[in-house]
Image (cartoon, rainbow, N blue to C red):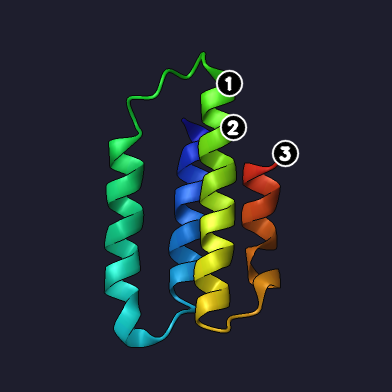
Amino acid sequence: MEKALRAYMEVLRLVRRLPRDTRPYYAKYARENFVNYREVDSADSTSLQDLFNRTYHHSLWVLDKYSVDKSAADKLKDICCS
């Protein structure tokens, strides 16, 4: 649970780097996804790692879409891909 909360907070930090008019959409999208997946069994490490990898790669896609330097997601990579 702690890792998921750290990832969520880091995603919200990345949302702040997006253009102002897109921030509410992506903040809501992130929240909805984290709420929807909170019921994933914490004992299923494969499913959890898959979700963390998708979190990281989707964040990279969004950053690239808005031409934000992908290195901004380095901390998220450390959280999700370790």
Using the rendered view, name the quadrant where residue 38 is placed: top left
Which disc, if any, is residue 49? 2
CA distance for labels 1 and 3: 12 Å
Q: Secondary structure at mark 3?
A: loop
What percent of the width, then of the height, locates residue 55?
51, 49
- Say few, some or many: other residues with alpha carbon within 10 Å of mark 1 (under 14 / 14 to 19 / 20 or more): few
- Say few, some or many: other residues with alpha carbon within 10 Å of mark 3 (under 14 / 14 to 19 / 20 or more): few
Work out whether 56 lies above or below 41.
Answer: below
Using the rendered view, name the quadrant where residue 39 is placed: top left
Q: Secondary structure at mark 1?
A: helix
Q: Residue at x 50, y 38 (%)?
A: 51
The residue pinned by badge 3 equals 82
Work out whether 17 lies above or below 49.
Answer: below
CA distance for labels 3 and 2: 9 Å
Q: Is there a contact, CB below 8 Å, between mark 1 and mark 2?
A: yes
The numbered mark, 1 or 3, whose residue comes first in the sequence reads 1
Amino acid on which disc 1 is placed: Ser
Amino acid on which disc 3 is placed: Ser
CA distance for labels 1 and 2: 6 Å
Residue 3 appears in the figure: no
- Point out the image quarter for the C terminus: top right
In this rendering, would 31 be left or right of 77? left
The residue pinned by badge 1 equals 45
Between 11 and 65, the one nearer to me in the picture? 65
The numbered mark, 3 or 2, whose residue comes first in the sequence reads 2
In this rendering, would 49 be left or right of 32? right
Residue 58 appears in the figure: yes
What percent of the width, then of the height, locates residue 56?
58, 53
